[in-house]
Amino acid sequence: MADEARARKVLPPGSMAYGGSWWWRTATRTWILRLGSSILIWTVLMQLASVWHPRLPKSSSAACFDGRGAAASGGGGSGLNASTNLSVLGGEEHALSGTRSAPRVLLPRRLYRSNGYLRVSCNGGLNQMRAAICDMVSIARFLNLTLVVPELDKTSFWADRSDFGDIFDVDHFINSLRDEVKIVRALPKKFSTNIHTEVFSMPPVSWSGLKYYLKEILPLIRKHKVVHFNRTDARLANNGLPLRLQKLRCRVNYKALRFTPAIEALGNKLISILQRNGFFVVLHLRYEMDMLSFSGCTHGCSAEETEVLTRMRSFTYLWISRYAYPWWKEKEIISEKKRSEGLCPLTPEETTLVLRALGFASDTLIYIASGEIFGGDRRMASLRASYPRILSKEMLLSAEELRSFQNHSTQMAALDYMVSVASGVFVPTFDGNMAKVVEGHRRYSGFRETIALDRKELVKLLDLLEGGKLSWDQFSTAVRELHKDRMGQPTLRKVLPGRPKEEDYFYSNPQECTGPSRIRSIGSRKFDI
C-alpha cells in the first residue's frame, strides 16, 4: 500500500512541479528561433526591395537611362508662343537642376572589381568642362574604373579658382551615379602620400572611340593603378558608341550635374523675374574680349581696340615675340578671312540687323547671356536703340546677391546657362561650347526653339545690305529663308567618318536620348545631310 501511495505521488513530466525549468528553456528557445527567423526574412525583403528599386515607374530618378525620364512630360514643341513657365514643363525644372530633394532610398551600388583610379583635370570654360565630365564618367563606366571627383580648370584665361563643389552638388553627383560607377572625392592616402611614385599623367587622344580606351588606356591603368588625364576636351567620339553609353552621357549631363543650392536659387530667381514679364529671348552675345582675341576677329573694332586684342594674343619680351596663351593653336590670323568663313561671332551691330530681319519686335524682352561686352556701351548702342527691353543678371540682381559670384566667371556662366535653357527662344551669335551644350539641353527638354545662325551666309547678306545691293525687304526675306530649318527642330546628327571636328557635336544634338517616338519621326523624314 505504501508503494501504491508513492506511485500516486509521482507527477507527470509536464507538470510545473516536475519540469518547470525544462518548459521555460523550451519556450525561450522557440521565441529566439522565431525572432531570428523574422529578422532574416526582413533582411532578405529589404535586399530584394533595393534590387527592384531601378524598376520603379519613370517618375523615379532611376528612369534616367530610359531617355528623358520626367522631362518627357514637358511634351510639346517649342515656338514663339510656347510657354516658358517651368511649372508647366513637368520635368524641365529638374532637367535644369537635377532632382530637388535627395532620393529617400539610395540607388543600389553597382558592385564590380575596379581596374584602378581615373583622375581628371578638366580644361576650358563651364560648358566645355561639363561635356568633358560626362565623357569621363562614361569612360570610367566602360573600363570599370573608380572615378575621382573631377578637378576644374584654374589656369585658363578666366583664372577662376572655383572647385567642382563650388559649381555642382558633389553628393548628388556621386549618389545619383552609384548604380553605374564608383566616384570618390579624393584618391586613397596610399597614392597621395607616396612621394616615391608620381601619378602617371597624359592627355588622351581627341575624339577617340572605345577601342582606343580598351587597348591603350586600360593597360596603363592596370599597370600604374592611377592614371591622370590632364586634358579632357572632346576626348570621346561623338558617334559609334553603344546606345547605353550614349544614354549615360545624357544622364550625367541632365540629371547628375546639378548646380549647387546657391547657384540654383539665384538662377531660379532670374528665371522667375523674367517670366513674370512674359515671353523672353536669351541672346548669347559672345562678343567678349577673350573670344575676339582667341578668334582674331576685329571686324567693327577701332584701331585702338584692335591693338588691345592683338596685344592680348602676343607680346614682346627681350625683343622676342611671345604668345600670352601659348596653347591657342592659331598664331597669325587674318580677321576678314575668318569672318568670310563664318568663324567670327556676329558683332552687336550685325546681331541687331539679324534679329530685326527674323521678325523680333522692338518690345521683345531680351536677356543678354554673356560677360562684359568688348567696347562697352558704344558697341551696344544700336542694339539698345532697337531693343530697349534688354536685361542682364547685373541689372536684375543686387550687388549683394552677386557679391559671392564676383571673380568667379564659371559660377556666373552657370546662372546664364539656367536662364538660357528656360528661355522662350535661345539665339547664340557664335557656336561655342555654351551655344552647343545649351542647344542640346533644349532639344532634350522638348526641342525648344534655338536659332542656329548661319554666320557664313549671314555675313554675305550683311555686306550686300551695307553696300546697297539688297533692300531691307530682300535682306529680311533671305535671312528668314536661310534659317527656317535651323530652329532646333528634330534632326539627325551629321556624321563624317574621319572628320570628327566637322561633324555635329553629340552634346548639341543628343538624339539617342530624346525618346524613341521622336527618333522614329526623324527617320521617316528626309534630310539633306
Image (cartoon, rainbow, N blue to C red):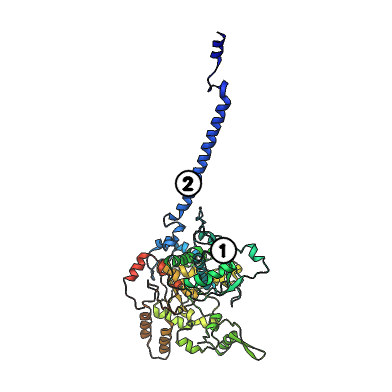
Mark 1 lies on residue: 262
Q: Quadrant of the N terminus?
A: top right
Q: Nearer the viewer, mark 1 or mark 2?
A: 2
Instruction: Specify whether residue 366 is in view.
Output: no
In percent of width and height, residue 438 lies at 47, 71
Q: Amino acid at mark 2?
A: Leu
In this view, the residue in front, 22 or 486, is 22
Q: Quadrant of residue 58?
A: bottom left
* 505 over 65 or under it: above or below: below
* 510 over 9 or under it: above or below: below
Q: Residue at x 50, y 63 (%)?
A: 256
Q: Secondary structure at mark 2?
A: helix
Q: Residue at x 47, y 86 (%)?
A: 339
Q: Quadrant of the C terminus?
A: bottom left
In percent of width and height, residue 140 lies at 52, 66
In this view, the residue in front, 446 or 13, is 13
In percent of width and height, residue 15 lies at 54, 21
Mark 1 to mark 2 CA distance (whole Å): 39 Å
Q: Secondary structure at mark 1?
A: helix
Q: Amino acid at mark 1?
A: Ala
For label 2, the crowd category at 10 Å Cα-Cα, with few meaning under 14, some 14 to 19 and many 20 or more, is few
Instruction: Specify whether residue 138 is in view.
Output: yes
For label 1, the crowd category at 10 Å Cα-Cα, with few meaning under 14, some 14 to 19 and many 20 or more, is few
In percent of width and height, residue 500 lies at 45, 78
Mark 2 lies on residue: 45
N-term-proximal mark, 1 vs 2: 2
Please identify the residue farthest to the top as the structure is shown: 1
